Image: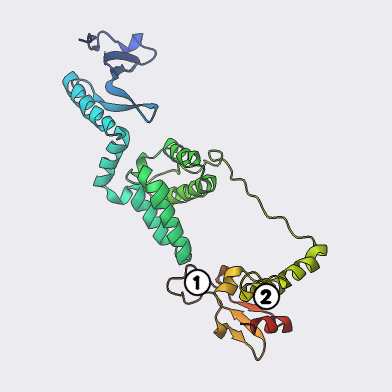
């Protein structure tokens, strides 16, 4: 049986003799921390996911040794189920004030951004559900520290998702800024995490030298392996410098063949079952394509 050290009393640990906090070990992982001022608090050390942490169990003598042992056994059961007791405790606190839980704050922030397109809003919500909510969604925003966000971002990076980690860092900062604006917290603990994530390596395709443009046009003209429509679409884009979605989702009603003017609307009526078909001109501003005879010829081709 593990020997139990006698619990320190005020007489045995006078504040005048203590310079640093004194740990009085009781059982494996369980100890009593005696501070210079004489306060005594129970703590339990534990390991989860390879990392050592500790959790406070309460002040002595309000929490007796028997009470501390009982709490320890409950925490051991959580650890056996791979449940982090600190996060579990925070989640239980948050359930009493649901509006202050990170997930609800994030959803309120998401709903407040009305300028987003539906595609952008859906994509961001999917990212929250996949990468953020499973980790910190049930924690109160007042309990969140930089370490919570750092661990979350590192976990995404370890999966090789550098671009996702970078975007997630921005989302976290914006959500916690929203919490500050709503007076749920005083400062933003996710504001200065720029150096935490590894910048994704972006490789841009090289530009085609101008002197090779005739060669490109010749090769496009000689392309007959696919659909004829594809060849004309590429030539059309070279003449009017439009985005691929602006062309792919175009409607005949947008084109005035009499005046040879094409007006790309800010948005389009989505086609059922066709992803992104509601996209219009960039920045949601109507765009007028200048009239060109060559464009007219390509648009008449089936």
Q: On residue 277, which mark appears?
A: 1
What is the count of numbered marks?
2
Task: From the viewer's side, name the closer residue of 264 and 215.
Answer: 215
Question: Which of pointers 1 and 2 lies earlier in the amino acid sequence?
Answer: 2
Q: Residues within 10 Å of mark 2 (few under 14, many from 20)?
A: some
Task: From the viewer's side, name the closer residue of 297 and 131.
Answer: 297
In the displayed structure, 151 sits above or below 36; it is: below
The single residue placed furthest to the bottom in the displayed view is 258
Classify residue 257 by image quadrant: bottom right
- Estimate the x, y position of residue 36 in percent, counting from the top left: 34, 16
Q: Mark 1 and mark 2: span between their CA atoms? A: 19 Å
Residue 212 shows in this picture: yes
- Estimate the x, y position of residue 211 in percent, counting from the top left: 83, 63
- Estimate the x, y position of residue 28 in percent, counting from the top left: 28, 17
Task: From the viewer's side, name the closer residue of 295 and 30.
Answer: 295
Is 192 on the left-hand or right-hand side of 40?
A: right
- Estimate the x, y position of residue 172 in percent, counting from the top left: 45, 47
Specify how the rendered protein is coloured: rainbow
Q: Which residue is mark 2?
A: 236
Q: Secondary structure at mark 1?
A: loop
Q: Are marks 1 and 2 in contact (CB under 8 Å)?
A: no
Q: Quadrant of the N terminus?
A: top left
In the displayed structure, 254 sits above or below 20; it is: below
Residue 281 shows in this picture: no
Q: Secondary structure at mark 2?
A: helix
In the displayed structure, 107 sits above or below 301; it is: above
Q: Quadrant of the C terminus?
A: bottom right
Residue sitting at x 57%, y 40%? 198
């Amino acid at each position: 049986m593990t020997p139990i050290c006698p619990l320190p009393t005020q007489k045995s640990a006078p504040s005048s003799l203590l310079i640093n906090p004194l740990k009085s070990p009781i059982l494996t992982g369980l100890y009593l921390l005696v501070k210079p001022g004489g306060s005594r608090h129970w703590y339990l050390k534990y390991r989860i996911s390879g990392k050592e942490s500790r959790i406070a169990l309460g002040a002595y003598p309000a929490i007796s040794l028997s009470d501390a042992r009982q709490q320890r056994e409950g925490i051991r059961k959580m650890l056996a189920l791979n449940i982090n007791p600190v996060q579990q405790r925070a989640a239980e606190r948050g359930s009493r004030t649901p509006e202050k839980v990170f997930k609800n704050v994030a959803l309120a922030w998401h709903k407040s951004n009305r300028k987003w397109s539906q595609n952008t809003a859906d994509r961001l919500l999917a990212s929250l559900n996949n990468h953020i909510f499973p980790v910190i969604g049930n924690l109160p925003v007042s309990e969140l520290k930089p370490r919570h966000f750092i661990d979350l971002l590192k976990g995404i990076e370890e999966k090789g998702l550098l671009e996702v980690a970078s975007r997630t860092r921005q989302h976290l900062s914006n959500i916690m800024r929203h919490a500050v604006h709503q007076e749920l917290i005083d400062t933003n603990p996710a504001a200065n995490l720029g150096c935490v994530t590894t910048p994704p390596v972006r490789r841009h395709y090289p530009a085609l030298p101008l002197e090779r443009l005739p060669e490109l046009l010749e090769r496009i003209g000689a392309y007959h392996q696919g659909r004829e429509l594809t060849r004309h679409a590429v030539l059309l884009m070279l003449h009017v410098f439009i985005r691929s979605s602006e062309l792919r989702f175009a409607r005949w009603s947008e084109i005035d063949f009499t005046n040879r003017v094409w007006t790309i609307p800010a948005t389009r009526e989505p086609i059922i079952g066709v992803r992104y078909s509601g996209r219009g001109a960039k920045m949601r501003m109507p765009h007028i394509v200048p009239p060109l005879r060559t464009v007219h010829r390509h648009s008449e081709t089936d």
